[in-house]
Amino acid sequence: MPLLTAEWNPPSYFENSAMPYINDVVGAAIFDLNGLPKEYFTTSDNESMGWLQTIFQALGLRSLLMSSLQLETFHHAVIEGSDYYAVIVKQRTVYTALLLKQTEAVSLDLIQWAQTFDAEVLRTNPRFQAA
């Protein structure tokens, strides 16, 4: 019979092999497809919410450019700062913006990971607090 313990064992998606960039994420925001904010998440690494204004403006600019240039799709955008960068990706029903530590250049792997990112990870990971 298995021994029960009071220890918390994080699900496998908290491990780097399944979520290779999760330890670099210091903030996140979920926007609806109209570009309106739905949820925000912070970590103790960066509790500032100032970066969200830039994301909100980028989503507004995206809307303007898509309508005036008649672009059909928007897949992602990257906004670089001095210590962090934000990756904004369009998912099926939301836009997800992730604020990441600037540890390496933005790669195609990172963009693909962000496009399949499940915000449920933020709700269940003890590093993140809903703001």
Image (cartoon, helix red, strand yellow):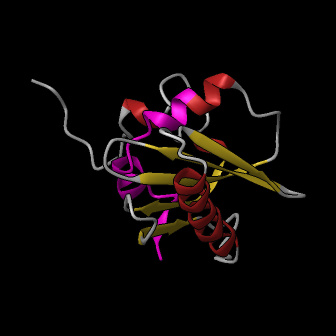
Check if residue 113 falls in the magenta segment.
Answer: yes
Whether 13 is drawn above or below 92: the answer is above
- Choose between 90 and 39: the one closer to the eye: 90
User: Is 92 left or right of 16, judged from the image as shown?
Assistant: left
Residue under the image location 48 percent in, 35 percent down: 115
Residues in magenta, as a range: 112-131
- Residue 25 position, x and y percent, is 62, 50
Tally the numbered discs. Answer: 0
Q: Is residue 20 visible?
A: no
Residue 59 x/y as whole percent: 57, 61
Q: Quadrant of the N terminus?
A: top left
Residue at the left extreme of this rendering: 1
Figure quadrant of residue 83: bottom right
Residue 84 lies, in percent from the top left, at 79, 55
Q: Is residue 39 visible?
A: yes
Asked if residue 53 lies left or right of residue 101, the reply is left
Decide whether residue 110 is among the magenta residues. Answer: no
Q: What residue lies at 36% left-to-right and 58% top-to-bottom?
A: 123
Return the residue nearer the eye: 9 or 68.
68
Seen in the image, is 82 located left or right of residue 115? right
Q: Residue furthest right?
A: 82
Residue 15: x and y, percent? 50, 31
Residue at coordinates 47% horizontally, 77% vertically from top-left?
131
Q: Is residue 93 above or below residue 72?
A: below
Kindly indicate the quadrant of the structure image that contains residue 99. bottom right
Compared to 111, does 27 lie above or below?
A: below
Name the one closer to the observer, 50 or 56: 56
Q: Toward the viewer: 6 or 71?
A: 71
Using the rendered view, name the quadrant where residue 110 is placed: top right
